[in-house]
Image (cartoon, rainbow, N blue to C red):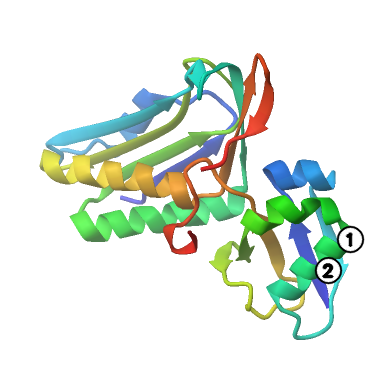
Amino acid sequence: MEPVIQLTREPLDREALVAAVSHPSIGGIVVFEGVVRDNARGKQVRYLEYEVYEEMARQQIREIIAQAEQRWGIEHVAVAHRFGRLEIGEASVIIVVASPHRSEAFEACRYIIDTLKTTVPIWKKEVATTGEEWVEG
Amino acid sequence: MNIHIRYFASLREAVGRNEETIIVPEGASVATVREQLLTRYPRLQTIMARAINAVNHRYVSAETTLHENDELVFVPPMGGGGPSWNQ
């Protein structure tokens, strides 16, 4: 299937993403969901602001998925990232990988989220009780 | 020739705008535009030193030659650390 790639200001819909990768040939589905934490480096976080360079992010995500598909022979992938203001506990990113056997799904999902974090142009601003700052790696 | 620059995150806030079109000599490189921007906005020095380059949605080196109407983005550091080949 064509991978599902979503970049949206709306809350992410985990069930819809899982449904999108489901297929009779699938034996396992791995979901990674990144959620907004209320603390960072000793600070009390109030909320996060995500900003995305949409055209480039889409292209980078497409390439990451293509690499994962080639490396692990997987064919059912969905990647969704939210931007704008996110409250504590809300999902910022969801990766869903489905495959006939579990090990490929686990490894590919891990690869996709780790690579996404370092190469896809999406920035996070922490708004804490003590002030705000763009988070750098 | 015209080059479209877009600004994101910390760089957007420091410049105070989302985008601009600048005119550079034919054959100019990404590095040329970097210098031009730093002359115009000296306060960008710190962020630009850590920003990597993207032209037309792809990461490129500073030596890359620009072409008419290219979209150039200086990508400020991302939370996850940036591409490993650039560290």
Other residues around mark 2 within 10 Å, as few (<14) / some (14–19) / many (≥20)? some
A32 or B40, nearer to the observer: B40
Q: Say which element carries label 1.
A: helix
Q: CA distance from mark 2 to mark 1?
A: 6 Å
Residue positioned most to the bottom: B27
User: Which residue is found at the position 41% from the left and 59% from the top?
Assistant: A63
Give the answer, above or below, for where B20 lies relative to A128.
Answer: below
Label 1 chain ID: B
Q: Which residue is mark 2?
A: B36
Quadrant the N terminus of chain B occupies: bottom right
Q: Are marks 2 and 1 in contact (CB under 8 Å)?
A: yes
Label 2 chain ID: B
B58 or B78, nearer to the observer: B78
Residue B17 visible from this viewpoint: no
Query: Hey, which quadrant is residue A56 in on the image?
Result: bottom right
Question: Percent from the top left, x then y, of residue A103?
Answer: 13, 42
Q: Which residue is mark 1?
A: B40
> For the residue marked with disc 2, what is the amino acid?
Gln
Other residues around mark 1 within 10 Å, as few (<14) / some (14–19) / many (≥20)? few
